[in-house]
């Protein structure tokens, strides 16, 4: 068995993918799985390195990053799972940090990260774990486990993932949220390391950060936020009930301006009944299946 399996979904950014792979040291106990989501001709990955497996999905099987990660899970052989985005990368001390925990019986290691620009310089968006001290309250731990949806700042025990059949949703937006919630829910032993070993590349035009989202993308984003708000209420934090949508509109105003904020509010008013029904179905599903 390998010690680490890195799963990297990829689409149309081979140069950045090469940087990501280069940031992972070449070791016999490291497996790297690249799942290409039907990239354009000339932009497919072409990495020739020991321990790197490339899986090419054609147009009929192109279903986004969630599906690509699920395909990668089918080929994973490591004790520990790590997920990286193709345009991101790790710092040189990454494996030395992970090795400290590789022989433990924890379920998840949460490690810190920093947001950078495409050229690797620190971004003005100071993303990181919200905590700066190992002295944490139960509420702080819930924030770590349930309020950071990205899969890439975690080292996850493969056995837990397979025992509970944890998989990504195969949707265009928010496909990692339910995966992350399940990981946090089932994890009995966790560890937090505040070393920022991951570099998240903040690109204004990316799917996550693009201000000019379609109505479908806005509604999907709203639904996921409402589902998350309802889940936090279920965890015992009712203060989010009234503030979730309001805070989101404020963030939309800051990031996209008044017009974008208006588009989001309009989309919410048009689809609020559907969003309300779906968010309650989500929590009922969670309560039924995650016991």
Image (spheres, grey):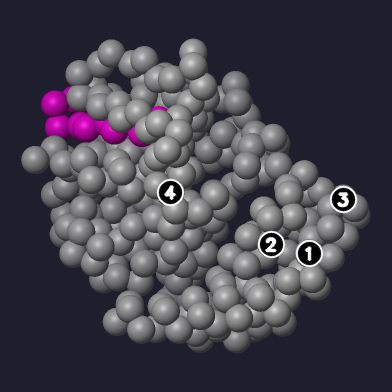
Quadrant containing the C terminus is bottom left
Mark 4 or mark 1, earlier in chain: 4
Can you identify the residue that label 1 sits on?
A: 267
The residues tagged by marks 3 and 2 sit, at their Cα atoms, a distance apart of 18 Å
Question: Label 4 vs label 1: CA separation?
Answer: 25 Å
Judge depth for marks 3 and 2 and give the one in front.
2
Choose top left, top right, bottom left or bottom right for residue 137.
Answer: bottom left
Q: Confirm whether residue 155 shows in the render.
A: yes
Q: What residue is drawn where x is 45% and y is 30%?
A: 38
Residue 66: assigned label: 4
Q: Which mark is residue 257?
A: 3
Segment colored magenta: 27-37
Whole-percent x, y for residue 34 in the image: 34, 31
Q: Nearer the viewer, mark 4 or mark 3?
A: 4
The answer to which of 114 and 186 lies nearer the viewer is: 186
Residue placed at 24% from the left, 66% from the top? 164
Q: Are marks 2 and 1 in contact (CB under 8 Å)?
A: yes
Q: Is residue 162 above or below residue 140?
A: above
Front position among marks 3 and 1 = 1
């Amino acid at each position: 068995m390998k010690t680490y399996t890195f799963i990297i979904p990829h689409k149309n950014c081979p140069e950045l993918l090469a940087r990501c792979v280069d940031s992972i040291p070449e070791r016999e106990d490291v497996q790297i799985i690249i799942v290409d989501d039907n990239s354009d001709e000339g932009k497919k990955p072409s990495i020739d390195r020991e321990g790197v497996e490339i899986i090419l999905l054609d147009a009929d099987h192109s279903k986004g990053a969630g599906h690509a990660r699920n395909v990668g899970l089918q080929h994973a052989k490591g004790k520990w799972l790590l997920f990286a985005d193709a345009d991101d990368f790790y710092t040189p001390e990454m494996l030395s940090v992970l090795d400290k925990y590789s022989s433990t019986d924890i379920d998840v290691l949460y490690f810190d990260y920093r947001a950078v620009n495409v050229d690797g310089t620190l971004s003005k968006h100071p993303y990181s774990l919200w905590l700066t001290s190992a002295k944490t309250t139960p509420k702080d731990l819930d924030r770590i486990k349930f309020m950071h949806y990205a899969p890439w700042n975690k080292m996850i025990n493969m056995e837990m993932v397979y025992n509970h059949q944890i998989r990504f949703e195969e949707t265009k937006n928010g496909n990692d949220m339910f995966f992350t919630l399940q990981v946090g829910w089932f994890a009995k032993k966790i560890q937090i390391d505040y070393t920022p070993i991951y570099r998240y590349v903040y690109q204004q035009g990316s799917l996550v950060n693009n201000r000019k989202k379609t109505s479908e993308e806005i509604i999907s984003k709203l639904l996921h936020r409402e589902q998350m708000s309802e889940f936090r209420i279920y965890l015992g934090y009712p203060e989010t009930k009234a503030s979730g949508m309001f805070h989101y509109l404020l963030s939309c105003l800051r990031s996209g301006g008044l017009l974008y904020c208006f588009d989001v509010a309009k989309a919410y008013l048009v689809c609020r009944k559907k969003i309300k029904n779906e968010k309650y179905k989500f929590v009922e599903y969670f309560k039924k299946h995650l016991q």
